[in-house]
């Protein structure tokens, strides 16, 4: 008998309006124990408002939200509310119980080891509360999120660091249900991959808004899509969502065609009726109006069209000669050289705080290097998109932001000009929204407007520092299409692995101590190469670790080692079979990857393929490890 799932959250017919503007109407959904749910919607459609309603910060105009009695729920907001006078440790252990209080006292006692009495008292409290395992978990979470010194006050942290403290607080609380608004923002890629693994643990229920498509693919079991006034529920991960959405749009297109044919017949019928008589079938007239509404549907999705003309690019682009930069003892760049070519596409990766943004500022002349030389071609025109560079005025109207740069903008291709209003329409700012104040825009809409102001200046060398934060998936898809067609040079810093894989052909990997590695490939290829290098290093280390030999074991050890200089017959057969197995597994993996890319398979099949892909990956890793072990002794 199948075990029934426990419902954690029920949202019933909630609606929200701001003045005359209806944000959403009659939304209903639920979340069960262990379910991992993502909410996908366009910027400005009300995702953050839904989260505020779930957390109780706002009330719906209609409907209700119900949590299971006794459920432990934690929320991560885009702008976390933390006490600036508290330390990191106090903030993440805010829950008032014997275990957290014991850990706080113990950690502070460690800062003053000379006070042995206080240390002993704190140690005894840890024993009584049985808090040692929990303390190790707390330290692990904080370490993975980049916090080693937990005595630092919140007031001294950057916005990104505060978001990570808030995330640590949520995870350490060990809730039954966690609600996350853009959890991957301000995390470096290693942190994101760790968080992926953490959130997939069995039993934990999850609701999140994120644009990270690899995150959606690997973590989610359900995707909720808010499209206009409708909320669609898609079982499965991101691949399954894409397949189901394509099926739905195909059905809708068919229905519209049918409705148009029916409407023509109904129109003929309704026009034949005598106007002076009131004897028409009311149900037939009502059906006619329903058909008219269905046939009038515009199934074209709004497109973000980016075809602004690019400044001509000369033969000399950008040259970095023996570049050096450091702050105190911390080296950012130590003797790096590179000559850029036309249409070069570089991704920049490395942990937070390693100096990626400083590197970009040196290239654009905002900071001077300590040594070396930067030579910029005469025709180079940088377009530099940064998180800190967005300085839109809240009291300015959207159309005035554009007009301050130019009334008309030249287009690429066939030429011609666009007015400020026409350009805004292409950036999905339509109608009355062009005359809205910037203060009324969502975070993603502000970033889209800021991106427009960068592209309007006709750059031929685009530098994008975390451009994907807060942008919805539709905007990201079309931005990627534009950047793939962009004929200039592109340099991008992003934690969005999907975005980087799609757009870059090589990487500058910041490895610390000023060393920058130029890797020929995209991020996924780099991670695969790095994993191979780590595995090889581990095997080499294991092979070099030898037990100390006593006089009585010397001969036996020598014989054992001598016997292992060659493979046995059985091991040779095993190695040959492993090679065949690996070839078969790789071929099947490629087939599944192609099925995902085609997105023509039905959603249930895609979900099945996703499970098979996970099993394949694990089997490949196991067999590769065994093959490498045997290859050490192969002739």
Image (cartoon, rainbow, N blue to C red):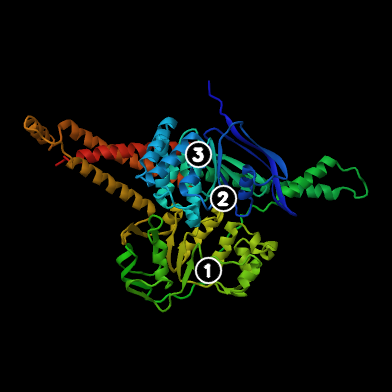
User: Which one is nearer the viewer's eye here, 24 or 351?
Assistant: 351
Q: Residues within 10 Å of mark 1 (few under 14, many from 20)?
A: some
Residue wearing tag 3: 173
Secondary structure under badge 2? loop
**Mark closer to the chain start, 1 or 2:** 2
**Mark closer to the chain start, 2 or 3:** 2
Numbered mark located on residue 342 in the image: none
Find out whether the residues at labels 3 and 1 contact each other: C-beta distance under 8 Å. no
**Mark closer to the chain start, 3 or 1:** 3
Q: Is residue 331 above or below residue 585?
A: below
Q: Quadrant of the C terminus?
A: top left
Numbered mark located on residue 81 in the image: 2
Find out whether the residues at labels 1 and 2 contact each other: C-beta distance under 8 Å. no
- Image coordinates of residue 95 in percent, x first then y, are 52, 39
Q: Residue at left 53%, top 23%?
A: 2
Q: Quadrant of residue 134?
A: top left
Number of numbered discs visible in the structure rendering: 3
Residue wearing tag 1: 455
Secondary structure under badge 3? loop
Foreground tag (3 vs 1): 3
Secondary structure under badge 1? helix
Q: CA distance from mark 1 to mark 2?
A: 34 Å
Q: CA distance from mark 2 to mark 3?
A: 16 Å
**Residue 480 visible to the viewer:** yes
- Image coordinates of residue 239 in percent, x first then y, are 49, 44
Foreground tag (1 vs 2): 2
- Image coordinates of residue 169 in percent, x first then y, are 50, 44
Q: Residue at left 48%, top 69%?
A: 383
């Amino acid at each position: 008998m199948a075990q029934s799932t426990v419902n954690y959250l029920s949202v019933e017919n909630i609606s929200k309006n701001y003045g005359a503007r209806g944000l959403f109407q009659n939304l209903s959904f639920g979340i069960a124990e262990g379910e991992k749910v993502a909410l996908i919607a366009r910027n400005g459609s009300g995702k953050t408002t839904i989260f505020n309603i779930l957390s109780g910060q706002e009330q719906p105009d209609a409907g209700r939200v119900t949590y299971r009695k006794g459920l432990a729920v934690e929320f991560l907001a885009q702008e976390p509310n933390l006490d600036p006078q508290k330390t990191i440790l106090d903030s993440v252990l805010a829950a008032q119980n014997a275990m957290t209080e014991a850990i706080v006292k113990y950690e502070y006692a460690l800062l003053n080891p000379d006070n042995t009495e206080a240390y002993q008292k704190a140690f005894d409290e840890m024993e009584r509360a049985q808090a040692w395992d929990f303390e190790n978990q707390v330290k692990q979470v904080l370490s993975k999120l980049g916090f080693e010194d937990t005595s630092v006050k919140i007031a001294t942290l950057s916005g990104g660091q505060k978001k990570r403290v808030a995330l640590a607080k949520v995870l350490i609380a060990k809730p039954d249900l966690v609600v996350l608004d853009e959890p991957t923002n301000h995390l470096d890629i290693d942190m994101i991959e760790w968080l992926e693994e953490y959130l997939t643990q069995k039993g934990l229920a999850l609701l999140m808004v994120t644009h990270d498509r690899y995150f959606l693919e690997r973590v989610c079991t359900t995707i909720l899509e808010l499209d206009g006034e409708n909320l669609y529920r898609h079982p499965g991960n991101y691949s399954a969502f894409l397949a189901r959405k394509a099926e739905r749009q195909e059905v809708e297109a068919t229905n519209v065609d049918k409705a148009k044919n029916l409407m023509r017949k109904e129109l003929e019928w309704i026009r034949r009726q005598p106007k002076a008589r009131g004897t028409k079938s009311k149900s037939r007239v009502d059906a006619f109006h329903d058909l008219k509404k269905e046939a009038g549907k515009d199934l074209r999705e709004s497109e973000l069209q980016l075809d602004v003309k690019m400044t001509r690019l000369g033969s000399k682009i950008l040259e970095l000669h023996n570049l050096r930069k450091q702050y105190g003892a911390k080296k950012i760049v130590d003797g790096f050289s590179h000559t850029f070519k036309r249409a070069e596409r570089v991704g920049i990766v490395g942990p937070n705080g390693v100096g990626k943004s400083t590197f970009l500022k040196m290239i654009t002349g905002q900071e001077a290097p300590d040594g070396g030389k930067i030579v910029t071609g005469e025709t180079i025109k940088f377009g530099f998109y940064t998180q800190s560079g967005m300085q839109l005025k809240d009291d300015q109207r959207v159309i005035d932001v554009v007009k301050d740069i130019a009334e008309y903008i030249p287009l690429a291709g066939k030429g011609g000009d666009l007015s400020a209003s026409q350009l805004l329409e292409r950036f999905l700012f339509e109608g009355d929204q062009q005359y809205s104040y910037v203060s009324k825009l969502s975070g993603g809409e502000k970033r889209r407007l800021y991106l427009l102001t960068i592209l309007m200046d006709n750059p031929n060398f685009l530098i994008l520092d975390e451009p994907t934060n807060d942008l919805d998936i539709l905007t990201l898809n079309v931005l990627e299409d534009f950047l793939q067609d962009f004929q200039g040079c592109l340099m991008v810093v992003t934690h969005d692995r999907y975005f980087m894989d799609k757009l870059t052909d090589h990487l500058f990997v910041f490895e610390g101590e000023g060393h920058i590695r130029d890797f020929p490939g995209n991020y996924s290829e780099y991670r695969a190469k790095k994993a191979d290098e780590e595995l090889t290093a581990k095997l080499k280390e294991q092979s070099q670790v030898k037990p100390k030999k006593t006089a009585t074991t010397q001969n036996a050890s020598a014989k054992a080692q001598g016997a292992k200089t060659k493979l046995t017959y059985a091991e040779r057969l095993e190695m040959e079979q492993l090679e065949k197995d690996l070839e078969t597994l790789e071929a099947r993996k490629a087939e599944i990857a192609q099925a995902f890319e085609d997105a023509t398979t039905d959603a249930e099949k895609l979900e099945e393929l996703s499970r098979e892909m996970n099993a394949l990956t694990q089997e490949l890793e196991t067999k590769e490890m065994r093959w490498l072990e045997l290859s050490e002794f192969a002739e």
